[in-house]
């Protein structure tokens, strides 16, 4: 349920005003420190949204439209205590026992435990959203127009707003040290110093804090929207996460570091890290000034890059601290990240693609052809070629480290390109948003649909394991699909009614899925064998020599008596030679190729049989 208010009685019982998934709010109670809860709503008419307890054990509940209710028997039964017809949004009780009720039409006070109420200052009709009273009896009232302060039991009021980033006050609290804290709709936490408010939210900045509370031990607690609970043990100077978990946040990106740490981007709440395979999660926000994390790249040296809607950031200490690293990025809306084995890093952004050769310290634009193109997917092949997928202009290919680009969209629909991956056998698969999965066996020369068995064509991510099995996460409640035949057909394997935005493998080859409901981990590992063992002894070696002029040789293995074809294609996918097209016994074969009648350039050779399809690239230099 959604909890709008909490209070603890002197006997240790905890009361909560809670909204269930369906129906009106209820008052619930726990007598075992929150392990179990029971509904204690007898006598309450209307939905409770506020609760407080006095030193005598009386419990007060504020409701929508039906005023305030009181229980004198630990919540077993309730009776109306006045203010009928009013919505009571907040309740606070002073050390002298006075009960203050903040309503949508002003502030009321009872000096006799709720038996009678008087409105404080008839001209004071602001909607009261938050109340706090310090040890001296000073009252702080939070409204949609700021904070009002009274030192004489509400007879006179002064505004107290200097330093606040918003006048819409969400919560107020007093610490055991008598310091006053406030949270606003402008995000963040503020501490009162004299007559001015100063930020007091290190570790919790940019969070929407809906509830603040001070504990007798000196700790401060804040409950946030979407980010769980934070705790401060040093008077509000520093806040740490106190509720482990992603609390079902929308995850836009996930990645696994070489040390096994799992990272999840959760716009607009920043980046989380798990060091126990997703069992618990903690925010990593120090220096990460944008919470809209859209892409994550982990490096072998344990450094991490986070692409956000407002720039690129790098961490060298497992995500604990972040430094901005986007010098040269003319578009700071970073949507995707990828790295070559040579060390170069590529960033796809709202306007173009960029390359860094010094771990993100400097960036250069990857060719003017993509300056005004939104790049949201990057795939890099084993030989260093780069595919860049756009939101509406198809796919582009670079064979020179991003200096120049060629459109390679033949056969693709006009849908956003979401994910690009190369299989161990050399084929390239792209996941599109609305068109499903497409496959190319000739490095983008031609794309063909690969959707048999897919019931959801909104693809969020595609990911190969080392055995060549490919997984597709879908974004229209279809869940995750598996193909064991290079995309020829698909089978649903779970997470139905879930939107999957990203996929990743951990060090043990468990599949991780970032979704609209947090991160999920597969219950078993995916099959893993080295790529050269795909299909038993079925394999296609790299041609030798390569580059060649004009002759080269191909070596391949087949595992059984079967029909085998070996063909050569140009960069546009046109067939230029058929070298083998016949039944072959199991064994290893070598075939010669003469390219005397061909021009210089890049070519592909493809081995096809019932055992599978394998493609490699070669270069002819004349």
Image: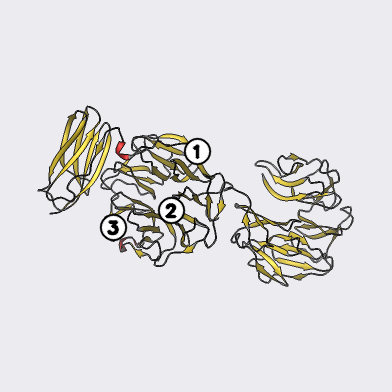
Residue identifier under label 2? 298
Q: Up-down: is 579 above or below 245?
A: above
Residue identifier under label 1? 495
Residue at 19 percent across and 28 percent down: it is: 585
Q: Give the class, few, some or many, for how many residues have Cα within 10 Å of label 1's Cα (few <14, many ≥20).
A: some
Rendered image: mark on residue 40: none
Q: Earlier in the sequence, mark 3 or mark 1?
A: 3
Quarter of the rendering containing residue 35: top right
Q: Are marks 2 and 3 in contact (CB under 8 Å)?
A: no
Give the number of marks: 3
Q: Are marks 2 and 1 in contact (CB under 8 Å)?
A: no
Residue at 18 percent across and 51 percent down: it is: 547
Quadrant (top left, top right, bottom left, bottom right) of the N terminus? top right
Q: Residue furthest left?
A: 596
Q: Give the class, few, some or many, for how many residues have Cα within 10 Å of label 3's Cα (few <14, many ≥20).
A: many
Locate residue 299 relative to residue 497 in the image: left or right: left
Q: Secondary structure at mark 1?
A: loop
Q: Which percent across, then down, holds residue 447?
A: 29, 44
Q: Secondary structure at mark 3?
A: loop
Residue identifier under label 3? 405
Q: Earlier in the sequence, mark 2 or mark 1?
A: 2
């Amino acid at each position: 349920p959604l909890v709008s208010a909490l209070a603890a009685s002197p006997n240790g019982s905890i009361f909560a005003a809670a909204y269930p998934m369906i129906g009106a709010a209820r008052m619930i109670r726990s007598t075992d420190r929150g392990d179990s809860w029971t509904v204690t709503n007898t006598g309450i008419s209307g939905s409770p949204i506020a609760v407080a307890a006095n030193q005598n054990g009386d419990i007060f509940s504020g409701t929508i439209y039906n005023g305030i209710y009181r229980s004198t028997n630990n919540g077993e039964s309730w009776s109306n205590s006045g203010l009928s017809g009013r919505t009571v949004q907040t309740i606070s009780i002073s050390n002298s026992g006075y009960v203050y009720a903040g309503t949508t039409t002003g502030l009321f006070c009872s000096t006799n435990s709720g038996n009678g109420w008087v409105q404080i200052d008839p001209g004071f009709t602001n909607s009261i959203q938050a109340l706090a009273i310090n040890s001296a009896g000073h009252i702080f009232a939070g409204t949609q127009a700021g904070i009002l302060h009274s030192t004489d039991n509400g007879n006179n009021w002064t505004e107290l707003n200097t330093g606040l980033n918003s006048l819409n006050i969400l919560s107020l609290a007093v610490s055991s040290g008598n310091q006053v804290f406030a949270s606003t709709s402008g995000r963040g936490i503020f501490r009162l110093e004299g007559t001015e408010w100063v930020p007091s939210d290190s570790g919790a900045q940019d969070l929407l804090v809906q509830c603040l509370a001070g504990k007798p031990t000196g700790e401060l607690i804040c409950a946030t929207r979407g980010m769980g609970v934070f705790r401060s043990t040093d008077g509000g100077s520093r806040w740490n996460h106190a509720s482990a978990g992603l609390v079902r946040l929308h995850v836009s990106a996930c990645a696994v570091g070489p040390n096994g740490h799992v990272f999840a981007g959760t716009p607009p709440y920043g980046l989380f890290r798990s060091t126990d395979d997703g069992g618990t999660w903690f925010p990593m926000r120090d220096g990460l000034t944008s919470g809209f994390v859209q892409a994550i790249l982990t490096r072998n040296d344990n450094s991490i890059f986070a692409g956000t809607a407002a720039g690129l950031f790098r961490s060298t200490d497992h995500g604990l601290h972040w430094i901005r690293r986007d010098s040269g990025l003319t578009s700071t809306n970073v949507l995707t990240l990828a790295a070559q084995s040579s060390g170069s890093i590529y960033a796809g952004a709202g306007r173009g693609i960029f390359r860094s050769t010094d771990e993100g310290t400097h960036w250069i634009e990857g060719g003017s052809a993509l300056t005004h193109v939104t790049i949201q997917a990057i795939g890099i092949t084993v030989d260093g070629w780069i595919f860049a997928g756009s939101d509406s202009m198809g796919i582009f290919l670079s064979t020179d480290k991003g200096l120049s680009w060629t459109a390679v969209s033949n056969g693709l629909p006009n849908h956003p390109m979401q994910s690009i991956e190369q299989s161990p056998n050399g084929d390239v698969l792209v996941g599109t948003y609305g068109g499903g999965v497409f496959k190319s066996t000739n490095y983008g020369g031609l794309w063909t649909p690969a959707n048999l068995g897919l019931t959801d064509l909104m693809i969020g991510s595609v990911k190969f394991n080392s055995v060549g099995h490919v997984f597709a996460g879908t974004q229209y409640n279809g869940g995750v699909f598996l193909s064991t035949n290079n995309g020829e057909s698909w089978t649903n394997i779970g997470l139905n009614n879930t939107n999957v935005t990203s996929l990743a493998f951990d060090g043990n080859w468990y599949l991780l899925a970032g979704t609209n409901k947090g991160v999920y981990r597969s219950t078993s590992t995916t099959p893993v064998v080295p790529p050269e063992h795909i299909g038993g002894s079925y394999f296609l070696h790299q041609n030798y020599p390569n580059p060649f002029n004009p002759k080269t040789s191909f070596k391949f293995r087949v595992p059984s008596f079967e029909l085998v074809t070996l063909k050569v294609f140009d960069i546009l996918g046109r067939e230029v030679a058929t070298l083998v097209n016949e039944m072959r016994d199991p064994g290893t074969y070598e075939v010669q190729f003469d390219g005397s009648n061909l021009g210089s350039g890049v070519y592909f050779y493809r081995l096809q049989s019932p055992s599978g399809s394998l493609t490699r690239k070669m270069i002819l230099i004349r």
